[in-house]
Image: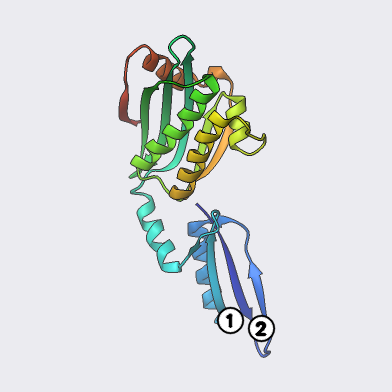
Amino acid sequence: MKIRLEWQYHVPKTKQSFFMKSEWMSVAQALMLSDDLEKTGRLKNIEFYDDQDTTWTKKELTKFLKQFETEPHDVKAYIDGGYNKETKNAGIGLAIYYKQNHKNWRLRFNDTLDLLEDNNEAEYAALYLLLRQLEELDVHHQTISVYSDSMLVVNQASGEWPCYEEHYLQWFNRIDQLTHKLGLTLQYELIDRSLNKEADQLATQALEGTKIEAIIEKQ
């Protein structure tokens, strides 16, 4: 989660005060800057905003920082959706890497969905199921790196391309609602299919009837 500060600063020996605004910074940096400003004795008011434009108190941020190491963070996720035109079934594959309690973890998950219309819809379903998995892990109020080999989904979900297709919009809206509910910022990166083999294999295994859900510690 990124934080910016807005504060009112009183000029010594005058009645003047100025409103200042910081650049985006980490929670730890924001708290350190706040402490430094308070030490001047000229700070009249200070407010903290995250990248969802939600306001925080200093007490809330301090509590968040203490909890941070015990909760999943530094999350990187690889997603893929496979589609069988004959059965209209989709296979979803997710590989989620994160840190928690000073250890590195990997979650591998796949699933099947039916009655989808095409491969792009399967890719959107993969993105939505990623958010559902993050919700189960209690991931919230942070930036998530999402890697996908779907040019359409990456560009539409990031806002670079418009989305007009009704069956995509249904997923798009669900993704947007859950993203805001969790206070997440999704940073998308389009990668070559060769770099997305793990998620692709999981999606293929789902279509073949092999279900996988496992978390292991990575050394």
The image quadrant where one finds the C terminus is top left
Image coordinates of residue 69 in percent, x first then y, are 37, 49
Residue type pointed to by label 2: Val
**CA distance separating discs 2 and 1:** 7 Å
Q: Which residue is mark 2?
A: 11
Residue 217 in view (yes/no): yes
At horizontal 56% and vertical 80% (from top left) the residue drawn is 44
Relative height, residue 50 to residue 87 (above, below)? below
For the residue pair 45 and 124, the one nearer the viewer reads as 124
Q: Residues within 10 Å of mark 1 (few under 14, many from 20)?
A: some
* Residue 102 falls left or right of residue 30: left
* Residue 136 falls left or right of residue 129: left
Q: Are marks 2 and 1 in contact (CB under 8 Å)?
A: yes
At horizontal 57% and vertical 24% (from top left) the residue drawn is 150
- Tell me which colouring the rendered structure shows: rainbow
Relative height, residue 76 to residue 182 (above, below)? above
Residue type pointed to by label 1: Arg
Image coordinates of residue 204 in percent, x first then y, are 42, 14
Q: Which residue is mark 1?
A: 42
Q: Regarding mark 2 in the picture, which secondary structure is present there?
A: loop
Image coordinates of residue 153 in percent, x first then y, are 58, 29
